[in-house]
Image (cartoon, rainbow, N blue to C red):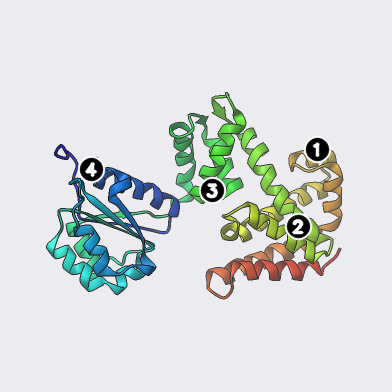
Amino acid sequence: MMASQTTLHFISVVHGKNAYVRRQVLERVIERELDGGDRSLNVIQIEGVKADGASVLDDVRTYSLLGDRRVVVVREADKFISQNRGVLEKFLKTGCDSGCLILVCDGLDKRTKFAKAVVSAGDVNECAEMKRKDLPGWICETASTVYGKRMGYPAAARLVEHAGTGQEGLDSELAKLSLFVGDREEIGPDDVDTLVGTYREENVFAVMDAIAAGDAPTALTQWQQVLMTDRAAPGRAIGGLAYGVRRLMEARWAYDQGGSPASLARQYWMRPDEFERRMKRFSAERLGNLLRDLLRADVRTKTGLGSVAREIERFIVKHSARVA
C-alpha cells in the first residue's frame, strides 16, 4: 500500500445533536482513516451501550491480515466514554499505529481531561445544528451538488417554511422535488408549494378539521397517520400544528376584511367548500385560544414538564370538546 498523503489519526470523535451532519462527517472520517483499505474487511461497527472498553481497544490495536488500517466505530458512545474514561485516557497517551477508534456521540464535554487530550492528540468533529438563516444557502448548494438542480433563495426559504429546519427532512424533500420537476433544471417556489406545502397542510388540516368537528378519536387517528408517514413528525409536531393555526388565522383575518372566499381558498390551497366550512368553525377567538395552548405545550416540552406525544394528545382532547 502506498504511503498516505493525508493526516491519519488513532482516535477521532464525531459529536453533536445534528444527526444528519453526523452521518455525513462519519462517512468522510471512515474513508480518510481507512487510507485506501477495504471497507468490508477493515471497518468494525459497535453499539456503545453494549461495548466493553478493553475489547474495543483490542480491536483497534489488532493489525489487519492484509496490512490495512483497522477502523473501529463506536456508535452512541456517550455512556461508553463516561464508563471507560480512564482506559481511553491511557490509550490517548500510548497512541496506536494499527488503526483508528471513532467515537460517535451526542456531546463532548470540552472541560474534561479526556476531551482536552483528544483535541491535542486526535481529531474532533463537531456537528452542530445549522442556524435557520444559513439553511437556504445550504439547500441551494445541496440541490446543485447532490441533485443537479438549480434552486434560488426564495424557493429554498419556502422549503424551510414548509418542511422545518431539520436537515435530514429538508434533504428528503429535495430528493422528492428533484423527481417532481423531472427534466427541468430549476426547482421554483411554486414547485415547493405544490409538492411540500400542500402535503403538509393536508396533514395538519385533517387534524384541525376533526378538532373543529369535536371528533377527538378521528383527530387522534389522523395524528397517528401523520406520525406513520413522517419520521420527523414528533420533533416538529407542535410547530406544524402552530403553522396550520397561523395559516387559518391569516385566512380568517383576510375573510373578515371582506376578501373573496373563492380567491382566498385558492391562496390557502383549499377547496371552496373546505374554506367556507373552516371559516364557520374557526372564529378568531377560537384560533387565538388554539395558538395560546400550543405555545404552552411547546414550553412544557422544552422545559421537561411533558412529552410531545402527551402534549399533542392533551391539546386534541381539550379542543375537540369546543365545538363552535
How far across and down, in percent of the image, does residue 295 sit? 63, 65
The dot on residue 169 is 3
Nearer to me, 213 or 175: 175
Q: Secondary structure at mark 4?
A: loop
Q: Is residue 285 visible?
A: no
Cα distance in 3D space between marks 4 and 2: 54 Å
Instruction: Check if mark 2's residue and mark 1's residue have beta carbons within 8 Å.
Output: no
Q: Nearer the viewer, mark 1 or mark 4?
A: 4
Q: Residue at x 31, y 72 (%)?
A: 82
Q: Nearer the viewer, mark 4 or mark 2?
A: 4
Q: Which residue is mark 2?
A: 208
Q: Quadrant of residue 13?
A: bottom left
Instruction: Check if mark 4's residue and mark 3's residue have beta carbons within 8 Å.
Output: no
Q: Is residue 34 visible?
A: yes
Q: Quadrant of residue 228?
A: bottom right
Q: Which residue is mark 1?
A: 263
Disc 1 marks a residue whose amino acid type is Ser
Cα distance in 3D space between marks 1 and 4: 61 Å
Instruction: Check if mark 4's residue and mark 2's residue have beta carbons within 8 Å.
Output: no
Disc 3 marks a residue whose amino acid type is Gly
